[in-house]
Amino acid sequence: MLLHRVELAGQYQRAARARELGLHQVELAALEHLVVFGALTPGELGHRLGLTSGGVTALAGRMIDAGHVARSAHPSDRRMRVLTPTDEGRRHVAASLEPVLEPGERALSWLSGEDAQTLERFLDLLAPLKERAAVATPGPATEPAAEPYRSAMLM
């Protein structure tokens, strides 16, 4: 439960940073993913953020227009495109990282060197496990609409 509370605090902190930067939370989250992981296809980014293809297309358009993201050809598949953060996008994320890093650095300073290394190993193991769990989590089951246009009308 403590780890869940830390994750919720992180979400709350992202909301505050997004307000400060004048971004929507999903835009800040997208930028953070692109800065940390580099180039992602729109599909990969949409999956990470829980967005539909239309949602990620709109998000990418807004972020490209704002100068935070660039769209380019995929390095190995010319049919695909990738999104990458621009220097401006990287600066935007870097400017908002201090409030994120400071509490962690402060808490680490209260630990012994050995305890800090143990925590670092734990987090190094935890991050990829959580990422794999996210990848393996299926979306909701969908049932065919009784009427052929019903789904589209609800969107």
Image (spheres, rainbow, N blue to C red):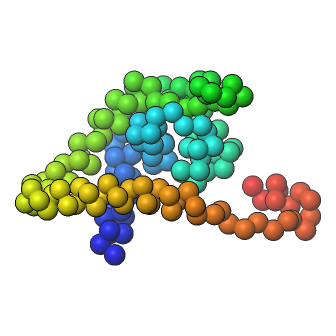
State the residue at coordinates (64%, 38%): 57
| Quarter holding residue 23 | top left
Q: Is residue 66 left or right of residue 138?
A: left
Quarter of the rendering containing residue 6: bottom left
Rendered view: 51 above or below 81: below
> Do we see residue 142 in this rendering?
yes
Indicate left or right for 131 with 104 as reference. right
Q: Quadrant of residue 21?
A: top left
User: Residue farthest to the bottom?
Assistant: 1
In the rendered structure, the answer to whether residue 133 lies left or right of residue 95 reads right
Q: Quadrant of the N terminus?
A: bottom left
Q: Is residue 110 visible?
A: no
Q: Position of residue 16 (x, y in %)?
A: 34, 51
In the displayed structure, 128 sits above or below 31; it is below
Residue at image point 38% right, 52% down? 15
Most foreground residue, 87 or 40:
40
Q: At 37% from the left edge and 51% from the top edge, which residue is drawn?
A: 14
Give residue 93's position: percent from left, percent from top: 35, 37
Q: Residue furthest right?
A: 147
Residue at the image position 39 percent from the left and 45 percent from the top = 18
Image position, residue 101 (x, y; %): 23, 47
Q: In which quadrant will I find the C terminus?
A: bottom right
* Residue 96: % across, % down: 30, 40
Please state the total of marks drawn on the protein image: 0
